Amino acid sequence: MKRYTYTEKKDTRSGFGDGLTELGRTNPNVVALCADLIGSLKMQGFINENPERFFQVGIAEANMMGIAAGLTIGGKIAFTGTFANFSTGRVYDQIRQSIAYSDKNVKICASHAGLTLGEDGATHQILEDIGLMKMLPGMTVINTCDYNQTKAATIAIAKHEGPVYLRFGRPVVPIFMPEGQFEIGKAIKLTEGKDVTIVATGHLVWEALQASEVLLDQYGIEAEVINIHTIKPLDETAVSESVSKTGCIVTAEEHNVLGGLGESVARVLALNNPTPQEFISTNDTFGESGTPAQLMDKYGLNSSSIILACKKVIARK
């Protein structure tokens, strides 16, 4: 089994910031908007080099979405930046009516998603954003796992015509994916296995890899780990081919069990190949204040929970 290591940790939001800066140098149609969170979204590099292509909207997220939609009418590729909670829940009406309905070329870039926002607490830790966004017709939904993948995804979505929701996080996490590797809608198989499939997204990809090593070393279980960075459109072929071999699956995400990756995978299985499935996710609950590590452990979003889920789902085959 291939084993993954890392030599550096970095936050995924920095991957977004560096990707946006690179786009500013290569694509003159890229413009950026922010709702008073330049530092948190790591947008200063783009601003320094392209001040005429940046719009500080202030704490007016709904207005930001409307401006972004308008800019695309003139041929611009608009990247909006704020926290995931403010990028979705606060502005859902504007996204639906002004962006999704008319298929505007807006890239909704959302930092500080999930429980790993940490001490800011439940009001900021949105865990239903993927569900909100994937239900919008025509909306592409992406959730990246590390700095390299976030940077590559930021660059890739500028070439995609249509609205995109790009979700990333706050904490420093291992960098383990290769640079520049990203194709919208194409899952990445990280390890080969015959006993259980683990499909993971975002911060849970690294946890899945750690779980796969323990499963092999301590229990002789060969897990096939797949990085699902694009939740919509989902790579249904990758999921179906893997479960045809392993006969069971665990989905892992930093999101509510209702509306997330797990439900999208369950739909694929129900239509094509009914298969035992276990879910690693939050269970219809809000978060709370705490360190990212404390919260991930309390809510069972870690390698230990993935290991237990794999053993459970294998027993159901």
Image: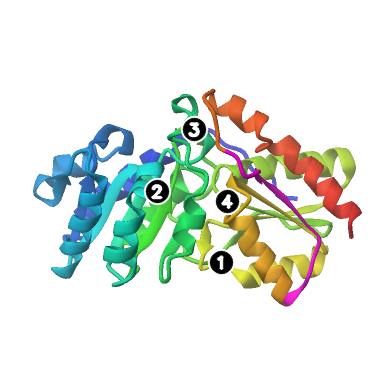
Q: Secondary structure at mark 1?
A: loop
Is residue 275 depicted above or below 210 in this figure? below
Query: Is mark 2 in CB contact (under 8 Å) with mark 1?
Result: no
Q: CA distance from mark 4 to mark 1?
A: 12 Å
Pick whichever of labels 2 and 1 is earlier in the sequence. Answer: 2
Identify which amino acid the numbered label 4 is placed on: Thr
Distance between mark 2 and mark 1 Cα atoms: 23 Å
Which residue is under mark 1?
234
Count of numbered tags: 4
Amino acid beneath label 1:
Leu
> How far is mark 2 from mark 4, CA to CA?
21 Å
Q: Is residue 66 left or right of residue 5?
A: left
Q: Is residue 178 left or right of residue 70?
A: right
Q: Residues within 10 Å of mark 4 (few under 14, many from 20)?
A: many
| Residue underneath mark 3 | 122
Residue occupying the far bottom of the picture = 272
**Looking at the image, is mark 4 or mark 1 earlier in the sequence?**
4
Residue span colored magenta: 272-285
Foreground tag (1 vs 3): 3
- Cβ atoms at labels 2 and 3 below 8 Å apart: no
In the rendered image, residue 282 lying in the magenta stretch gets the answer yes
Mark 1 or mark 3, earlier in chain: 3
Say which mark, if any, is on residue 89.
2
Q: Which mark is residue 201?
A: 4
